[in-house]
Amino acid sequence: MLTVKNLSHLAKVFPDKIFGCGVSKMEGAKNQELSYQIALEGEGEYALEICSTLPSLKIYKVGYVYSGLPIYEPDKDEGYLTRTPGYFPDVLLPFDGKIKLEKGKNESIWITIPEGAPVGNHLISAIFHGADGDFVGEAVSIKIRDIFLPRQYLYFTQWVHYDCIASAHGVEIFSEEHWALIEKYVRLAVEHGMNMLLTPVLTPPLDTEVGSERPTVQLVDITVLENGDYSFDFSRLARFVKMARDCGIEHFEINHLFTQWGAEHAPKVMATVNGEYKKIFGWETDALEGEYPRFLEQLIPSLIYALTSLGVDRGDIFFHISDEPSEEHAKSYHRAGRWVMPLILGCNQIDAISSYDTFKKVVIVSPVVGIDHIEPFNRANVPNLWGYYCCAQWTEVSNRFLDMPSARNRIIGTQIFKYDLVGFLHWGYNFYYTQLSKRRELNPYEETDAGGAFPSGDAFSVYPLKNDVAPSIRQKVFKYALDDARLLSLVEAKIGTLSTHRLINGLAGMDVTFKNYPTDEAFFDNLVRGAFDILEEKIIPEEIL
C-alpha cells in the first residue's frame, strides 16, 4: 500500500520521520519560483504521472546525504531537528519518472514551478502507477498573482571554489571540461539569486593551512620582465568575465590580496620567469615588505583597466584585503588596507569582520558581519553593512545546516530586509575538501562536514553530478528567502518602512531580530499572503495586525 502526502517546501522528509507541514495551496508572484514536496511510503516501484494546468515543471528526487557532525554541541541549541549523526534529505537529484520504495523508509519528490507561470489559478496532481494499482495524490492549487517582484537589490555572493570543481569531477584546471563545469556551477548559482562572483585573479588564499597551498586557479598570466617589472595577460580573465555575464553575474569580487588571519603574507602568485613557470610569492612573502607591494602597484591598475575595458564598471568591482581580521590582526590589516585603498579608488572594498571594536581600528568600507555580532554595527548606523554566516553561527541565529528546520534558513530574507543590509556573503558554495584545504578530497554525499570540522551544510550548497551539478533543498529555500526580501521591499515602497516593519512584527508576534524570530511555517504563508493583499489593495496593514 502506498501512502502519498503533499508537503511544504519547508518540510524535511527523513528515512524514518517527517518534519514539517502538509500543503494544499500555494501562491507566488509571476516572476517567482515555487516548490513543494511529495512524501511517499510503501514498497515497490512506481512511475509518476503529473497532471497540471501549468506548462512546465521541474521534478527532482530528494536524495539522502550523510552527516557525521550535524551540530557542534547537541545540548546547546534545541532548534535542530535530530542533533544526531545520520542521513539527511538535501541533494535534489535528476528524476527519471520512476521511484523505488523500500518498506518502512520514506522517500520524497521535489516539485518546482519555474518563474514565468501564467497569472491565475492552477492545479497540480500526481498519479503513481505501480504493480498494485494507481494511487492519486491530493491536488495542490497554485495561485500566481499579477505581481512582479522587483530586481534583487541585495548583493549576494557564495564563494565558488574552482579547484574543488576540478577535483570533484576529475578534470584539469582550465581545461575545456573545467570551463564547461564552471559555467554550470555559476549558472545554477545565478538561478538561485547569486549576482556577485568570486574572481580568482590570483589563487584565493582562503581556508589554507599556513605554509601550504591550494591548486592554482589564477586567471591572470604573469611574466617577470628582464628589468624586474611585470607584464599581464588578461585573456583568461576576459573569458571568465564573458562567461559570468552570460550566466547573469553583475558584480565581480576580486580574491583577497593578502593571506587570511592577519594580512601578513602574499597569496600564492605564479609567473613565468626566464621561461620557467614558478611561484614568485606566497607564505614566505611579507605583505608590505620587499617586492610584493611593487607587484600590486602594477597589477591592480592594470586589472582595473582590463575589467573596465571589458565593460565592468568600477562600481561593480569589489576588492578584499584579508578575511576575518581579529583584534590581534588589527594593526597588520589596517596597514594593508590603508596601503591598498589609493589603488582601488572608485571600486568597492569588503571584508568579513565580527568585532565592532576591531572594526573601529581598521579600514573596511563595507563590513561583512557575522549575524550574531551585527547589533553593535546596527546601533552605530554603520553604512554599507553586509551580513554573513558560517560554521560559527550555529546557536540562536539563522543558518542553513542540514539538521536545521528549513524555516530557520528562510527567515534570513526577512531579517536582511528589516536590518536594511546591502549584501550577504556565504563562503561555502562548493568546498569539497577537508578543513584548511589539506587536499583530502571528499565525497560530498558521504562526508558533508569538511572532515568533521564544520556542521554539515556549511561547506557547500550544491553537489557534483557526472558532467553537471545538482542543487540542494537548502539552496532552494535560500532563494525563497531572497524573494521574501524582494517582496518586502515592494511592500515598503507602497506603505513605508515603519508600516512594513509593523507588518513583519505583527505576523511574527515579536520584534524580529537576528536572534529572535518565528520558527513556524505558517509565518511565511501569512507574510506572503498579507504582502500580496496589500499590493493588490485588498487590505490595509491594520487589518492584518
Image: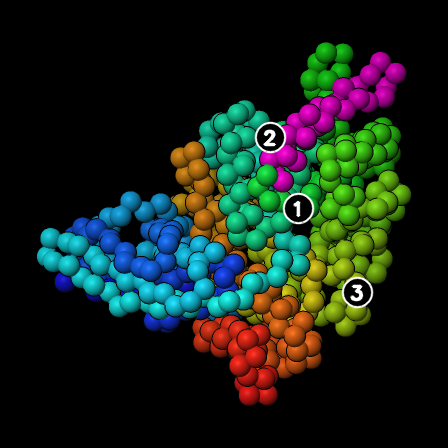
Q: Of residues 471 and 105, which is closer to you in this image?
A: 471
Q: Which residue carries the number 3 mark?
A: 382
Residue located at (73% from left, 23% from top): 233
Taking 70 as reference, is 380 above or below it? below
Residue 269 visible in the snapshot: yes
Q: Amino acid at mark 3?
A: Val
Neighbor class of circle 3 (other Cα within 10 Å; few <14, some 14-19, many 20+) is: some
Query: Which stretch did the figure color magenta?
Result: 218-245
The amino acid type, in three-letter code, at marker 1 is Glu
Q: Which residue is mark 2?
A: 215
Closer to viewer: mark 1 or mark 3:
1
Q: Please say whether residue 7 is visible from this viewpoint.
A: no
Q: Is residue 230 magenta?
A: yes
Q: Secondary structure at mark 1?
A: loop
363 to the left or right of 474? right
Q: Label 2's element? A: loop
From this view, report whether residue 474 is shown above or below residue 206. below
Q: Earlier in the sequence, mark 2 or mark 1?
A: 2
Element type where label 3 sits in the image:
loop
Task: Indicate whether 242 appears above or below 413.
Answer: above
